[in-house]
Amino acid sequence: MLTMTGIGKSFLGVRVLRDVDLSVAAGEVHAVVGENGAGKSTLMKILAGVHAPDEGRIEIDGGPVSFGHPLDAQRGGVAIIYQEFNLLPERSVAENVFLGREPVRRGLVDRSAMEKATAELLDGLGVHSFRPRDLVRRLSVAQQQVVEIVKALSQNARIVVMDEPTAALAEHEVELLYRLVRRLQERGIAILYISHRLREVFDLADRVTVLKDGARVTTVPTAEVDTDELVRLMVGRELRDYYPPRAEPGSAGEALLSLRKAGNDRLRDIDLDLRAGEIVGIAGLQGSGRTELAKAIFGAEPFTHGEMTPLRPRSVRAAVRAGIGLVTEDRKAEGLALRQSVRDNALLVTRATGRGGGRSVKDLLAAVRISPPRPDQEVRYLSGGNQQKVVLAKWMTVAPKVLLFDEPTRGVDVGAKAAIHELMRGLAADGMAIMMISSELPELIGMSDRVVVLRDGAIAGELPAGPTEEAVMRLAAGEVAA
C-alpha cells in the first residue's frame, strides 16, 4: 500500500535522513524502532506532509504522491496518531472526531448525523464503554486513544501511523489497544507502529525496520529476530550489557528508611526496609498500590497509621527535608516545568526547599550526561531520555538519602534507558537507597537487588535478585505454584 524509497532530509545543513526505504502492506503492522534521534519522527512527518523530502519518492497503491501539507496527506489516506493527543477536552467525542469536517444541514452543523456516524465507528471497533456525546475530559487515557483512532477512521485513512501509542497507558489499557490494532488489520489498514517497548513490537508487528543515525539498518520479519539482536542493531551492544552489574549480595548498608505496619486507605500493613547501596524493585499489577506506596513515603498521600522511621512525613516538603526524593511516573505533568530552562528545572527543588547539595548545575548536567549540555534550552525541546535526566539532576541538587523512581524509563529509547540505569546504579554505589517501580519486568529483574511484589495494597511476597518473570507474576496475580 505504501512505499517510501531513498528518502533523504537535511535541516540547516545537518543530514537527518539518508537513503531510507520503508514499505507497508495492507493489513500489515510494520514496526519502526531506533534510539531518539534515529530519524523515526522525521520520516513519519515526511509521510504526513509536515516536511517535504529533499530526496526520494513516496508511492501509495503504486502511484507517486507528493504531500505539501498535512491536509494533503489526510486526503491521501494517511493519518498519524501522535504520542500527545490532539483533542479538545471540553468537546464531545463526536465533535472531536469530526472537528473541522462537521456535516452540515441547512447551514447548521448536523449533530445527529455526526453522532450517528461516530456511534457506527465505535460499534465497528467493538467499543461500548463510552458514547459520542461524552465529553473527552471525562474519558480515560486509553479511551482518548480510541477517539484518536476513530478520528483517523472517519477520515477514511488507509495508512495509520501510531507514535508511541502505549506511552501514557496503564498495563490493563494496553490490551485494549492491542485489540484495536488487530481490528484495523482485519479491515486491511496498513499500520506503521513506532515504539520503544520491544515487547509490543514482537506482540504486534509482522516486520520491523531499524533506523540508526538517520539511515535504515535493516528490515526483517519479527519472527526472524529476537530481543537481543534487535537491541544490538539499535544501539550496537548486546542485551546482556543492557543492565549494569548488581551490588554484591549482602553488601547493602544500614536501613535509611523503615516501614512497619504502615498504611492508609490504599495501603495496608506495609513492612519494608530501604537500605543504603541497594535498589529495591517494586512489582505488581495495575491497582496493586505501587505508585500509592511511593506517594505515601513521599508525603504526597501520607500514611495514616503504622511506623515510618526516621520520620513519617505529613507533606512533600517534610519528606524532602528528611532526605527523600521522588522521580514521578509522569515527568511532563508532575516532574518538570516544560517551558522553563534546563537550569531552572535542575534548581526546582533547591529553590522550593532551600536545600542544596553544593554541586553546580554545570557539574550536575555533566554527571547525568545530558546531550547536548545546554543549560538555557527549554526542557520541552529535549528528548524523553534527556528530560528524565533533568529530573534526576533536580533531585541530585539536594542529595537525597532515599530516592524513589516510578517508571524511571517510560517513553525513553533503549540507549537512554541504559544511561539512566547506570546513573541509578551509580547513586546506589554512592550509598543512596533506591526504590524502583517498573511495569517492565525485564527492567525490574535486571536492575533490582531484590523484588517486593504488591497485591491489593499489601506486600504479597519478596524475591531475591534475578527472579523469573513467572515467579513475579505468580505473586502479583495471587497464584500459588503447583
Image (tube, grey):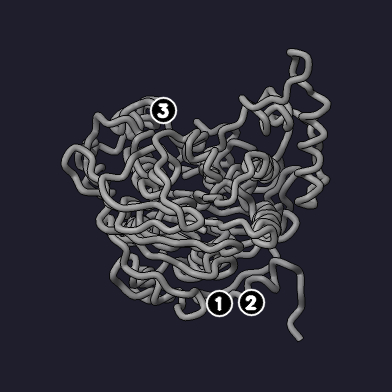
Of mark 1 and mark 3, the one earlier in the sequence is: 3
The residue lying toward the viewer, choosing from 302 and 158, is 158
Pointer 2 residue: 471
Query: Considering the numbered disc 3 on the image, is that residue within a helix, a strand or a loop?
Result: helix
Image point (54%, 70%), residue name: 206
Q: Is residue 296 above or below residue 428?
A: above
Amino acid type, residue under disc 1 in the picture:
Pro
Q: Are marks 1 and 3 in contact (CB under 8 Å)?
A: no
The residue lying toward the viewer, choosing from 388 and 412, is 412
Answer left or right for 113 relative to 257: right
Q: Are marks 3 and 2 in contact (CB under 8 Å)?
A: no
Query: Considering the numbered disc 1 on the image, is that residue within a helix, a strand or a loop?
Result: loop
For the question of whether residue 328 can be seen, the reply is yes
Pointer 3 residue: 353
Tell me which corner region of the image, top left, top right, bottom left or bottom right, holds residue 180: bottom right
Image point (52%, 34%), residue name: 333
Amino acid type, residue under disc 2 in the picture:
Ala
Residue lying at the far top of the rendered structure? 107
Residue lying at the far bottom of the rendered structure? 482
> Residue 77: x, y in percent?
56, 45
Query: Considering the numbered disc 2 on the image, is that residue within a helix, a strand or a loop?
Result: helix
> Residue 318: x, y in percent?
51, 33
Q: Which mark is residue 467?
A: 1
Image point (81%, 44%), residue name: 129
Residue lying at the far front of the rendered structure? 63
Nearer to us of marks 3 and 2 is: 2
Q: Is residue 29 above or below residue 348?
A: below
